[in-house]
Amino acid sequence: MPSPRDAVPALGAFALVVALGFDEGGYAPTAWGWSAVLLLALLAALLTRGAPRPGRWAIVLVAGLAALFVWSGMSSLWSSHVGASVEDAGRVLSYAAAVAVFALAGAGPALLAGVLGGATLLCGYGLARWLLGNPEIPLSADPQAAERLSEPIGYANGVALLAAMGLLLAVGFAARSAQTRHAALASATPPLLAATLYFTFGRGAWLALGFG
C-alpha cells in the first residue's frame, strides 16, 4: 500500500479509474478521448524528465499494444465501418498510453493501490444499487442483461472483470503489505468485490480470477 510520498500517483490512478468507470467504463469516444489525451500528456512529461528504463515485460506489452494500435488504424483502409475502426484504434492508444505511464512512473504499488481503491468504489456503488433493487437496465441484446449486475459501467462482463482484478490486487496487498494497517484495509475489500462478481453472473471473470 502507498506511503505518504506515493499519495499523488495513488490518487491519480484512483481518480482515473473512477472517472472512466462512471463514464461507460471508458468505452465511448467521449470517455477514452479525454483519458487518452491526459495519459499521453503524462507520458510526454515522464519521457521529458528522463524516466528510468522499464522492465522487459513492460516493454513487450507496450510494444504489443502499439502494434495493435497501428493495425487497428490501418484496418480503416479496408473496413466497411471506418468510424468503428478509428474508435477501436483510439481505445487501444489509450490502453498503450496507460501501460506506458504505469511502467515509467516508478510507483507501481501506489498506482495499483489507487486502482484497487477505484475498483472497490465502483463495485460498491454497483452492488448497493443492485441490493437496493434499483439497478439500471442496460441496452443489450442479451435477454438476461436485466438480471445481471452491470452498473456503473453498463456491461455486466466489464464489471465482473473489474471485480476480479480488484480481488487479485486485494489478495496481493493483504499478503505482501509490510504494515498491518494496510494489510487490514486490503483484507476488508474481498467480500464486497466477490459479491459484486457473483451478481454479475459472469463465468469468464471467475475463470480469469482462477488463473490469476
Image: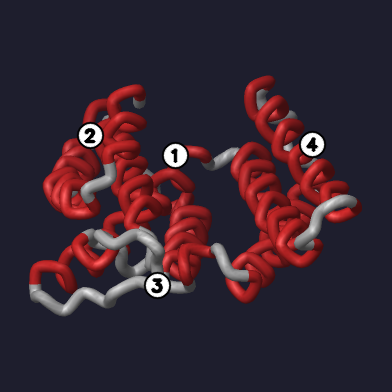
In this rendering, the label closer to the viewer, 3 or 1: 3
The amino acid type, in three-letter code, at marker 2 is Ala
Q: Can you see residue 188?
A: no
Q: Position of residue 203 (x, y in %)?
A: 27, 38
* Residue occupying image coordinates x 43% and y 44%: 112
Residue 174: which disc? 2
Residue depicted at x 83% and y 48%:
75
Pick out the residue farthest to the right. 77
Mark 3 vs 1, N-terminal side: 1
- Alpha-carbon distance for marks 2 and 1? 12 Å
SS for tag 3? loop
Q: Amino acid at mark 1?
A: Pro
State which tag comes first along the sequence, 2 or 1. 1
Q: CA distance from mark 3 to mark 2?
A: 37 Å
Q: Quadrant of residue 109?
A: top left
Q: Position of residue 49 (x, y in %)?
A: 79, 48
- At 69% across and 62% down in the image, what residue appears? 36
Distance from label 4 to label 1 (Cα)? Answer: 27 Å
Looking at the rendered image, the quarter that the N terminus falls into is top left
Amino acid type shown at disc 4: Ala
Q: CA distance from mark 3 to mark 1?
A: 36 Å
